[in-house]
Amino acid sequence: MSQVPALSYSSYRTYLECPQRWKYLYVDKLPETPRGYFTFGRVVHSVLEELVRPLVVPSARRRGETESQRTLDEWPSAVPVAPAQPWMTQEQLLALYDRSWTGDGYVSVEEENRYRSLGRDLLLRYYEQLLRDRPRPVAVEAHLEARWNGIPVHGYIDRIDRTPAGGLEIVDYKTSRELSNEDAQDSDQLSLYQVLVANNYTEPVERLTLFHLRSLTPLRTRPRDAGALTSLHDRLGTVSDGIRNDAFEPNPGRQCTRCDFRSICPEFRAVPPTDGARLTELVDRFEALRQEEHRLETELRRTAEELHRAAEELGVHRVAGTRTTAIRRREEAWQYSLDTIRPLLERSGLAGRLGTGTPEEVRRLLRDLTIDPEVRRGLAEAGARRVRWYWELEEPRGAG
Ligand code: SF4
């Protein structure tokens, strides 16, 4: 049994994708190869943090369960006020970007230059928007923790803003190429942040936002309802139980192509050279048999159909071969249209008599003489008889 660390969104998502990879990262603490795309995201996030921090006016935070809540009035009078004038020039912003830049993980100088110029353009446009729109952040890069119904969770939230109505808006920056409204609506990350903010701040969460930096577009959604949060809590509980029980099986899939641990992952362990030839032969045989199986299935179906057509024409059910006899069997089943049956029963005050609507249930109603004959006739008319023919082989002569 392992101790379960507080789950962040990325830890939770990693475990869902592949428990084995989660173990490499969070238990064995193996490093990953840097990737330019992630480096780029980190640099842009850190510059935005510095850029927005002077605008922050802290908000009331909850304290521990045994302590009373703190309100805005308790903050020292020296609470910073959002500056009216630009607090950073464009030149200072670009100098900050240059100081923060790191070339880790880019596959070529061209790629690094492309990302570097994208970041410069994106930050300058964001800066203009910031001067125009002047958000009211109460926190940037806020590290929040909570124990959510027994599950410890935590996360770093890019920005928390005050809304015009006095509530809170959670903002998560995204440097990705594409982002849609559905991404914001379905984001487990935003749901988890909602829980963290609700547990740490006194004001209500009013909006959840993914901010698409490349287009400067905020994709806003309403806070999650209780049902969505319960469903996320269930999934977090499954992850938490898995970690506690050391369930770290590999989960191979598309994620393997970008996984740094293929060389040590049991899923990709190579067959020892001494067994290579034997196993290769087995795989080839297995594959050949599979193909034969498909061919035989097709041939069997065609032969049965041909035999059925001939037997139908002649009106016979038993056909002798040289070794055994083939017997044509008939299977009959009734199917009922529930779209017809339910309204009929509702109109007759019998809606409660039908459960899941299996054919057996309907046939029981048909046999029930306490039900009006007109209703039973309606039920019968909503049914269709399906007949299936199939062949069986008699025991070979002389067997047994
Ligand atoms: S290679 Fe695939 S299965 Fe193995 S740890 Fe990585 S993601 Fe998991």
Image (cartoon, rainbow, N blue to C red):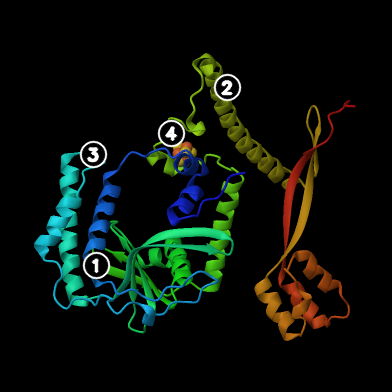
**SS assignment at label 4:** loop
Mark 2 or 4 closer to N-term?
A: 4
Q: CA distance from mark 1 to mark 4?
A: 40 Å
> In this rendering, which labeled residue sits more in front, label 3 or label 1?
1
Residue flagged by tag 1: what amino acid is it? Val
Q: Closer to the camera, 356 or 348? A: 356
Mark 2 or 3 closer to N-term?
A: 3
Q: CA distance from mark 3 to mark 1?
A: 31 Å
The residue to which callout 1 is attached is 52
Q: CA distance from mark 1 to mark 2?
A: 63 Å
Please name the residue shown 49% across and 55% down the image: 7
Mark 1 or 2 closer to N-term?
A: 1
Please name the residue shown 16% across and 56% down the image: 96
Residue 78 picture location, percent across and down: 27, 77
- For residue 216, say whether it is visible: no
Residue 70 picture location, percent across and down: 43, 77
The residue to which callout 2 is attached is 282
Q: Closer to the camera, 225 or 50? A: 50
Q: CA distance from mark 4 to mark 3?
A: 20 Å
Mark 3 or 1 closer to N-term?
A: 1
* Residues at discs 1 and 2 in contact (Cβ within 8 Å): no
Q: Dot 1, crowdedness within 10 Å: few (<14), some or many (≥20)?
A: many
Q: Dot 2, crowdedness within 10 Å: few (<14), some or many (≥20)?
A: few
Mark 4 or 3 closer to N-term?
A: 3
Q: Is mark 4 within 8 Å of ligand 1?
A: yes
> In this rendering, which labeled residue sits more in front, label 2 or label 3?
3
Residue flagged by tag 4: what amino acid is it? Arg
Q: CA distance from mark 2 to mark 3?
A: 41 Å
Figure label count: 4
Residue 358 picture location, percent across and down: 74, 65
Mark 1 or 4 closer to N-term?
A: 1
